[in-house]
Image: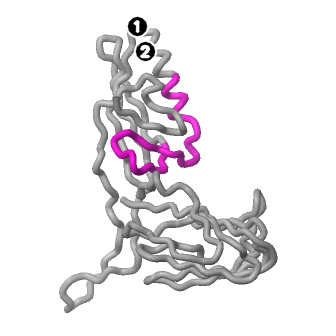
Amino acid sequence: MNYFEYKGIRSSDMGIRIESKNVFSGPEYEMDFLSIPGRDGDLIAGGGRFPNVQVTYSVFIPAKTTSELAQKITAVKNWLYSGLNSYHTLSDTYDTAFFRYGVFSGKLDIEDELTRIGLCTISFSCKPFRYSVEDQQSIMLTNGGVINNPYPFPSKPRISLAGSGSGTLTIQSADSNKTWTFTDVNSLTIDSEQMLCYSGTESKNDTVSGDGFPLLYPGENTFSFTGGILAVAILPRWCSL
């Protein structure tokens, strides 16, 4: 039986049965085009972006009595309508190699068939990329090294530093060569997705200098570090559409 899992809870545990899902939908890349008089074709003006995508499940909620159906629907509403101010992990049995970050969107229009089955559509607004389930463990490097991004899109890693004092971190790839300098590397974490450097609950953005936050580009990414950095742990967050 197919199910989706949202906020750590399976739809099947909520009494939901899935009829279908828009499995192969993908985002439309948003970009601007510039027309120049006398020149054939348009120029691509600047970088574009991938907007959120809608992931939709057509479902029904079986029940033996009207009161049982009402109780199940109440529980489903409490589950879906809580935590709407942040993204949550969304996965399903249709695509077991990847998961998404999404939040329930829209509304629940539940129809009553023979007063026993609730028919409805459940939609989530999801970040455009899917994230590899297999690659959710950190890669430890103690003397530098190379890690390979197997997908054609840059990923936004979480990098944790071990050591003390000051140091530098350099990441080289075919598309980039950037260095970050740290005045205090003790238990420091760089989260490129959150655009934040921190140690525990304390922000450490003011202890880091460099161009933006690290990205891991397609293909080989070579790590090297100096000074008080003894090791780095990289959660790569490989992603694909």
Q: Would you name the residue on which mark 1 appears? A: 65
Kind of residue at badge 2:
Leu
Q: Residue lying furthest right in this view?
A: 165
Q: Quadrant of the N terminus?
A: top left
Asked whether residue 156 is in view, the answer is yes
Q: Looking at the image, which residue is at 30% across and 16% down?
A: 113
Tell me the crowding category of disc 1: few under 14, some 14 to 19, or many 20 or more residues within 10 angstroms, Cα based. Answer: few
In the rendered view, would you say 221 is above or below 95?
Answer: below
How many discs mark residues in the rendered view?
A: 2
- Nearer-the-camera pick, 50 or 170: 170
Dot 2 corresponds to which residue? 69
Determine the residue positioned at 52% across, 55% down. Answer: 136
Q: What residue is drawn where x is 73% and y is 81%?
A: 167
Residue 10 placement (x, y as % from top left): 47, 32
Q: CA distance from mark 2 to mark 1?
A: 6 Å
Residue extent of the magenta highlight? 75-103
Residue 173 x/y as whole percent: 48, 81
- Secondary structure beneath dot 2 equals helix
Disc 2 and disc 1 in contact, CB within 8 angstroms: yes
> Residue 163, how many percent across, how many down?
76, 71
Q: Is residue 55 above or below residue 1?
A: below
Residue drawn at (47%, 25%), measured in percent from left and top?
A: 14
Give, as a three-letter code, the residue at label 1. Answer: Thr
Q: Secondary structure at mark 1?
A: loop
Q: Position of residue 64 (x, y in %)?
A: 38, 9
The image's colouring method is: one colour
205 shown above or below 54: below
The picture quadrant where one finds residue 179 is: bottom right
Q: Tell me if 113 is positioned left or right of 129 in this view.
A: left
Q: Relative to residue 27, is residue 147 depicted above or below?
A: below
